[in-house]
Image: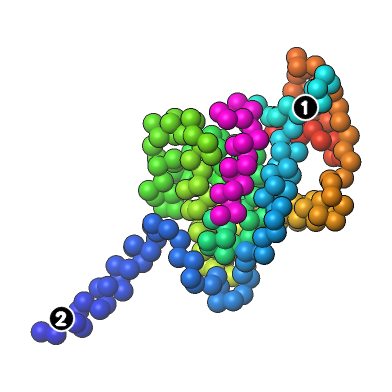
């Protein structure tokens, strides 16, 4: 019997099983054979700091009158090491993993903002975890301790970066795969959100819209050396969220109203 003729087909059948749960993303293959590639742009010296400031502006709930210091959303200011250091760590992970996997960090940031407002301990009704909301029941999260191990998640509360690098690495990997499967960035984002290339368009529209706003703000800062002037509002610490929502409805306000 010629064993080679048997072993070759078996290896082809087994290979996809291992490829479905990667130890680390394969960064050598281009997405979709050169079409609809979300590539890593040339990183400029201040890109990470600019992204950090863009996210922190959106996480600002109000500014204290006495010292003009921002007060961040509870989900962020409640993190150990403080909101600013944690966001800096998340942004570092995004840029590092995006560079490794040749992906656009601004798209990842837009996804993270839409998914969780950069809250590493956000948990959805469907048991999705992390700043990019990896579903526990999905094969995409297989092997991720942050998703499957509650004790590990608890320990992560004491870690700078809240153990989010593995979430970001896996999320980028699967977003690249979904773009390849669906044949477009829009379809890939819909599949990331719903499991189908023809899923609801509102997710892809929201994420791509956020990406464009982030890039516009970054370009504005690079051109002018500062962000557009924003309206600062001062509130007493005891104000209610509903009061904040009413006062800060103006989109030009530095105050975030949709996620407190």
On-image quarter of the N terminus: bottom left
Earlier residue among tags 2 and 1: 2
Q: Determine the residue positioned at 77% across, 27% down.
A: 69
| Residue 237 place in picture, x, y as percent | 75, 17
Q: Is residue 209 visible?
A: no
Which residue shows up at 66% across the image and 44% down it? Answer: 113
Q: Is residue 79 magenta?
A: yes
Give how far across and how far down residue 258 sits, in percent.
73, 35
How many neighbours does mark 2 have within 10 angstroms: few (below 14), some (14-19), or many (20 or more)? few
Query: As drawn, is 40 to the left or to the right of 25?
Result: right
Q: Position of residue 8 (x, y in %)?
A: 25, 78
Magenta-drawn stretch, dominant element (helix, strand or loop): helix
Q: Secondary structure at mark 1?
A: loop
SS category of the residue bearing label 2: helix
Residue 126's label in the rendered image is none
In the displayed image of the protein, which residue is found farthest to the bottom? 2
- Which residue is label 2 attached to? 3
Rendered view: 155 above or below 182: above
Residue at 58% in and 42% down: 89
Dot 1, how many residues are within 10 Å of its Cα: few (below 14), some (14-19), or many (20+)?
few
Q: Is residue 125 left or right of residue 212?
A: left
* Residue identified by numbered label 1: 69
* Magenta span: 77-96
Would residue 1 appear left or right of 118 to someone viewing this image? Answer: left
């Amino acid at each position: 019997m010629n064993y080679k003729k048997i072993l070759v087909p078996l290896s082809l059948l087994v290979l996809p099983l291992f490829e479905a749960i990667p130890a680390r993303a394969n960064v050598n293959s281009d997405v979709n054979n050169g079409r609809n590639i979300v590539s890593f742009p040339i990183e400029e010296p201040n890109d990470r700091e600019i992204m950090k400031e863009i996210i922190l502006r959106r996480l600002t709930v109000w500014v204290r009158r006495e010292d003009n210091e921002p007060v961040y959303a509870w989900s962020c200011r409640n993190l150990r090491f403080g909101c600013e250091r944690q966001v800096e760590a998340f942004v570092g992970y995004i840029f590092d993993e995006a560079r490794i996997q040749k992906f656009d960090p601004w798209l990842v940031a837009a996804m993270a903002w839409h998914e969780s407002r950069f809250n590493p301990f956000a948990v959805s009704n469907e048991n999705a975890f992390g700043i990019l909301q990896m579903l526990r029941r999905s094969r995409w999260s297989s092997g991720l301790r942050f998703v499957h191990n509650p004790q590990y998640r608890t320990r992560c509360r004491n870690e700078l970066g809240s153990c989010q690098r593995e979430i970001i690495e896996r999320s980028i990997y699967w977003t690249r795969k979904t773009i390849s499967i669906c044949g477009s960035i829009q379809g890939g984002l819909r599949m990331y959100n719903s499991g189908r290339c023809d899923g609801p368009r509102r997710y892809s529209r929201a994420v791509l819209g956020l990406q464009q706003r982030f890039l516009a703000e970054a370009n504005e800062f690079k051109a002018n050396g500062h962000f557009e002037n924003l309206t600062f509002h001062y509130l007493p610490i005891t104000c209610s969220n509903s009061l904040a929502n009413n006062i800060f409805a103006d989109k030009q306000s530095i105050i975030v109203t949709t996620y407190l």
